[in-house]
Structures are given as structure tokens and as C-alpha cells.
Image (tube, helix red, strand yellow):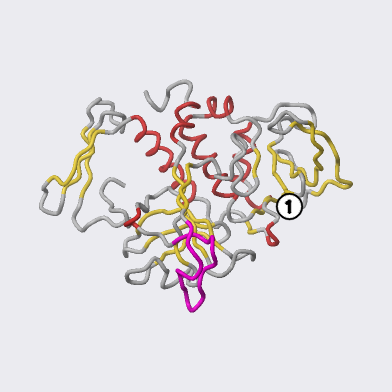
Amino acid sequence: MFATGSQGVVPAGYQVSVLDSSGNNQISSNDTIIVTDAQGQTVSQSRLSGDDIYALRFRESMINNVESAGKGWDFDPGLQLVKIRDAAVNPPENRLYTDKYGWQQQETVLERNQFWEVVNRGGQRFMLARTSDNQGNAIRPSDALNDLFNHPERYSVDCATPMAIFNLKATLETIGEDDFNRNVGQITLSGWYDQQDGNYDGGFIGKVRTAQAGTITVNGVSNLAGETALFDPAKGDTLIPGNSYYFDKPGDNTSDEQGWNAIYLGLNDQGQHRFWSSSVGVVNLNFKPDSWQPSSGFSNYYLGAAIANPNIDRLQSWDMDGSVRA
């Protein structure tokens, strides 16, 4: 990310080195990143801040977990968002819960396994991490989260929920198990929903631009008003490995295939852009010249101006033992 431009491309011959100012043999704050060109001339150098370290470790975890996830979780048709497979509660159970405003509301438990429950709240499905098992033994949030990765065949989701899942996993691995379990609360998954603040940003810091109708055309189909604008480095959009992005299908804002959320993994050896999307896996893309429309893979889509960056403030506030800063 230090040598790449906004389009995710590293110029030929560029190299990145680290001046280990602390002498601890690992990247840490106050280390200096030096970028040199093919002639060995220094192009840039910058000192790493605490924010940089959180971002680096978070994105490293995102990439490692995505690389090892294969195709991830099966896509759940019909936009049910979340589902525990072969785990229906029959008959469904009604119970009360306290919403974020402190009001008592009713929810219906639809599915349950050892670590998770799917409930209906006001017509929307949410997957909740269980806090205790059937014998009353406590279940740690990290154990419930890890079951999603250890047994993906037990779950099916839409293409947005994995973004929140990988965010939580990267947070866990960045700050450590104790701080994660101390701060995360009861994990609640449903698309981009973030139970920490009730926003639909998956726990990321998101940036989205939308377009006026008819300004983007892919294979003869134009976008609708409110669909994402085209990715544009001239407007500050950047491709950074470990960030989440969105491929938008113009003219479609209702079907299961209206768009794909994807995590960027960087360039492969052939110079193709590597993206991962749930139930699809890694897709290697070339973009059409002077365009952010793929020439293959996601060929009916365009890369939208919807970018999700790590929530550094949250990582810092949850890192109560200071292990990342150490």
C-alpha cells in the first residue's frame, strides 16, 4: 500500500524496505518505510504512526483469512441474509429482547445450533452468537465467530454479511482474544448491520458516492438513480489490499445479482486485480482501458465508488491491553 498508486499498481522495479527504529524485528510505530525506484533512488519515505500499525495488522488479517477461506459460505438465495443450515427450531420460539433504545421487543427464534441462533426481528433475519449452550455453559464470542470459519458448510449468507464477518475476524486477530471478547458484546449478523452502533456499515468506515441515472453504461444497460458512482481515482478512490469494495450491476436494484461485495487482495503475477467474493472465491480481473468495467469476470458490472476502510478508532479503543501499540 506504500508503493502502489490509487489504482493498486506498483511501478516496475519499485521496492519497499523498513528501517527498524525500535530494533524489535517487527513493524511497529516510528519505523520508517522507504520506497525506492528501479534505479535505487528514494521515491518516498514515511514514518509509521500508531494508526498505520492498526491498519496494517487489520488488513494483513483480512487478506490472510480471505485467502484461506476458499469460496467461503454458500450464497443464500432470496436475500434471506443469514441462515443456519439444517437447524430449524420447530415450532419457532417467541421471546423478548431489549432493543438499542432500551425497549422490550418480541423476536422469533427460527434456527439454532451450538454457537448461533437466527431470529426474526420485525421481518428481518439476524444471526446472534449464543452466550451460553444448552447446559448453561458460557460461550465466548470468539468461539462462535471461529465456528463460522471452521465449519462454513453449516451456514449460508448473502454477499454482504461476509464483509462484517471478516471485519470481526480481523479485529479479533488484531487486538487479541481477551480484548475482543471483553468489548464485542453479543455478535449480531445481518448483511452490513453493525450491532455496535446500529449502522449498516459492517463495522467499517465507509465512503460511498452515488450517480445520477444514465451516467454509467455497461453492455448497453445504464444505471438507475442512486446506484453507486463509478470508481474514480481522480475523486480520491483508492484500491488498497484488505479493503472492501462493491461491483454494481447497472439497472438492477432489486434482484439477488444486483451487486457483489468483494475484498481486494492486490495484484497477481500477471498484473491482474484479485478480488474475493463469498460463494465465488477469488476472481482475477482486468479492467477495460480507461474504465473500471471488468473485461472478464463480473463482466456485467462496474467497480463502484463504495469503499470500506478499517475502523481504526474502534480498534484502538478495544485494544485495552495495548498489545498492538507495544
Report which residue position mark 1 lands on: 85
Image quadrant in which you'd find residue 255: bottom right
Instruction: Report x, y in % for residue 249.
Output: 53, 67
- Look at the magenta stretch and give its main secondary structure: loop
Instruction: Report x, y in % for residue 223.
Output: 51, 68
| Front in this rendered view, residue 65 or 126 | 126
Instruction: Report x, y in % for residue 243.
Output: 43, 48
**Residue at the spot x=65%, y=47% of the render?**
190
Element assignment for label 1: loop
- Indicate the amino acid at tag 1: Arg
Q: Farthest residue toward the top?
A: 321
Extent of the magenta region? 210-229
**Residue at the spot x=46%, y=37% of the render?**
311
**Residue at the spot x=33%, y=56% of the render?**
233
With 218 as the anchor, is 12 left or right in this view? Answer: left
Instruction: Report x, y in % for residue 241.
Output: 39, 50
Q: Is residue 53 magenta?
A: no
Q: Is residue 224 magenta?
A: yes
Residue 177 in the image: above or below residue 205: above
Residue 79 in the image: above or below residue 205: below
Q: Farthest residue toward the front?
A: 212
With 255 as the anchor, is 56 left or right in this view? Answer: left
Q: Farthest residue toward the bottom?
A: 220
Residue 249 in the image: above or below residue 110: below
